Amino acid sequence: MKFIASRLQLLITIILFTGYASMAQTATQTTNSKTQNKTEMKTYLIEREIPDAGKFTPEQLKGISQKSCSVLTEMGPDIEWIQSYVTGNKIYCIYKAKNEELIREHAKKGGFPANTIVEVGTVISPATAK
């Protein structure tokens, strides 16, 4: 029970740290001068179980980041990486995407796990208390 409570607390803390950057957004994509296609972007928290992730060198983290960005460029505007948090054996990532399937496709193409994917329903911060 303590493990579940601490994991939930960690996830909430990560969400809080993302602040306004993690709020849901609407991305507008213009296909021609007369037509606009609006795509709702949802915010997702992804837990990636990666042994010894906290021991990765700056070069290794750069390589992972470059691979992720390369795949995102290939996939187009319906998915966006906001930021990630590296811990001992996990990396927690914040993404915006049209749907969860895009998150899974990104992980598969990039060759990294997406062990847990959770859609963020609401973001709170210290500003919420005011």
Image (tube, rainbow, N blue to C red):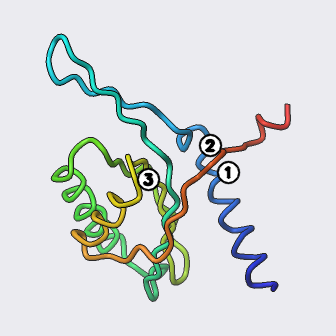
Q: Position of residue 97 (x, y in %)?
A: 39, 49
Query: In the image shown, does 63 or 125 lie closer to the viewer?
Result: 125
Q: Which mark is residue 19?
A: 2
| Within-10-Å neighbours for mark 3: few <14, some 14–19, many 20+ | many
The image shows residue 122 at horizontal and vertical percentages of 66, 45
Element carrying mark 1:
helix
| Residue at image point 28% right, 65% down | 105
Task: Give whichever of discs 3 and 1 has the lower sequence position.
Answer: 1
Q: Is residue 101 above or below residue 113?
A: above
Residue at 28% over, 26% down: 37
Instruction: Look at label 1 and name its amino acid.
Output: Leu
In the image, what residue type sits under mark 3? Tyr
Which corner quadrant holds the C terminus?
top right
Disc 3 on helix, strand or loop? strand
Q: Earlier in the sequence, mark 2 or mark 3?
A: 2
Separation of disc 3 and disc 1 at Cα? 14 Å
Question: Which numbered marker is on residue 16?
Answer: 1
Asked whether the beta carbons under mark 2 and mark 3 sit within 8 Å of each other, the answer is: no
Q: Residue at x 21, y 59 (%)?
A: 71
Q: Is residue 51 left or right of residue 22?
A: left
Q: What residue did someone put label 3 on? A: 95
Amino acid type at mark 2: Gly
